[in-house]
Image (cartoon, rainbow, N blue to C red):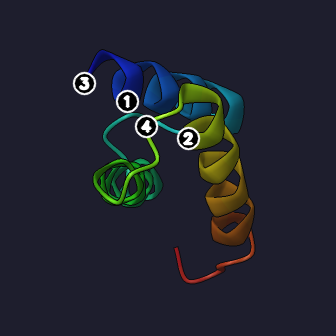
Amino acid sequence: MERLQRVFDELCREQGWARDGERARRHARMLIDDYLAGNTNEMHLLLAGRAFAERLRHDVSL
């Protein structure tokens, strides 16, 4: 859990997201799903989170 929290906090900081905002919640769900699917490497989670953030940046519905 600490690994996921560090990645989540870092990505929220990088993206300027409030930790309780909609984008951050979507991001947290993605990280948890990725972790449960076997991606337990902190750097890989960070890279996956950044890629997800890039996709969210282009989602104008939020």
Mark before the other along the chain sequence, 4 or 1: 1
| Badge 4 amino acid | Thr
34 in relation to 44, above or below = below
Mark before the other along the chain sequence, 3 or 4: 3
Q: Residue at x 75, y 75 (%)?
A: 58
Judging by the rendered image, the residue that carries numbered circle 3 is 1
Q: Residue at x 45, y 32 (%)?
A: 8
> CB of mark 4 within 8 Å of CB of mark 1?
no
**Residue closer to the observer: 59 or 8:** 8
| Badge 2 amino acid | Leu
Q: Residues within 10 Å of mark 2 (few under 14, many from 20)?
A: many
Q: Residue at x 43, y 48 (%)?
A: 24
- Location of residue 53 in the rendering, given as x and y in whole percent from the top left corner: 65, 56
> CB of mark 2 within 8 Å of CB of mark 4?
yes
Mark before the other along the chain sequence, 3 or 2: 3
Mark before the other along the chain sequence, 2 or 1: 1
Q: Residues within 10 Å of mark 1 (few under 14, many from 20)?
A: some
> CB of mark 3 within 8 Å of CB of mark 4?
no
Nearer the observer: mark 4 or 1; the answer is 4
> CB of mark 3 within 8 Å of CB of mark 1?
yes
Judging by the rendered image, the residue that carries numbered circle 4 is 40
What SS does tag 1 mark? helix
Using the image, tell me which numbered label, if any, was put on residue 45.
2
> CB of mark 3 within 8 Å of CB of mark 2?
no
Question: Quick check: 29 left or right of 45?
Answer: left
